[in-house]
Amino acid sequence: MKLTWILLITIFLAGCFGGKNTAQKSSGKKSISKILKSPDPAYKLKMAEQFFVKKKYTKAQLIFEDVIPYYKTEYKVFEDIYYKYSYCAYYLKDYMNAENLFKSFLEIFPNSTRAEEADYMRGYCFFKQSPKPELDQTSTIRTMGIMQTFINTHPGSARNKEATEIIDICREKLETKDRKSALLYYDLGQFRAAGVAYTELLNSYPESVQADNYKLMIIKSYYRFAELSIEEKQKERYEQVINECNEFTDRFPDSKLKKEADEFLNLSQKNIKRLNNEQIKTSA
């Protein structure tokens, strides 16, 4: 009997709280619907502002979107609405839409005191869409372009430091992607392709902290390529390795990797000497 009463009380309480939550959700939906149905734009705008301040961006976005047509002729109010409307998309992590809105803000309000901020946010929205290095880096490249344009357009901006840092982050991401691609060629045994890829990598990022490693990988790749080549091609390909080793010494004389580069230089020289001796024997 006691157990039955406990079960009944539990069910009753669950029903009460569950009903309360459902009622609250329903009330929230009704309140938004009621606001949107109001014929008073000023009231709608007031409510949108309140939701924005409370960080209820989905609700604010809906109402801002609804009132925009009413305020297009009131420049200052329209500007403020559009500014906050753009940020609603940003805070909701709808970065593609936010970028378009900030771009439109710039086009509609080019002389606004917020124009510089909107210009920066355009690039930042692209940055937020930038994926991990393994994926397509279109957004990363776009970020770099927009941020560089921002720096050029606003030379005295306090945001230029952040813009430069973002460019550096994007550049590092692109470098990581290219480095992984080059290493994949090497790991797959496609040594000529690896040599080309590492050469392009070094040319693209000559100031990289890994520049000497890229040069060493060029040497390794071409050495393995020469080693696996038919005998008629080996001499010229070992000579290419020697050239790469000499360039390494000229470019990175103090590198910790120089000893390893010198080993490939010695191996290549010995292989050429061996090939020459074999050629002499064959001729004799």
Image: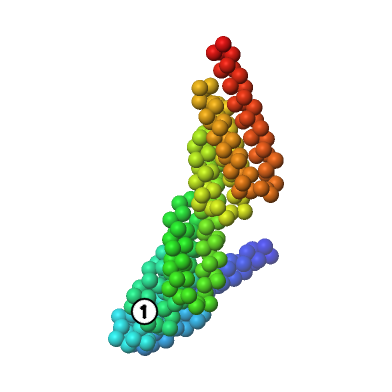
List the single residue furthest toward the top. 284
Residue 233, given in percent of the width and then of the height, sits at 50, 25
Give the quadrant of the C terminus: top right
Residue 161 seen: yes
Report whether 194 appears left or right of 119.
right
Residue at position x 52%, y 29% in the image: 236
Amino acid type, label 1: Pro
Could one spot residue 87 in this view of the protein? no
Q: Identify whether 6 is placed above or below 33.
A: above
Foreground residue among 105 and 21: 105
Q: Residue at x 50, y 22 (%)?
A: 232
Q: Which residue shows up at 37% across the image and 75% down it?
A: 106
The vertical placement of 179 against 219, above or below, is below
**Quarter of the figure with residue 8:** bottom right
Q: Nearer the viewer, residue 96 or 266?
A: 266
Estimate the x, y position of residue 37 in percent, counting from the top left: 33, 81
Mark 1 closeness class: few <14, some 14–19, many ≥20 residues within 10 Å = some
Q: Position of residue 145 (x, y in %)?
A: 44, 63
Read off the residue under disc 1.
110
252 up-or-down from 9: above or below: above
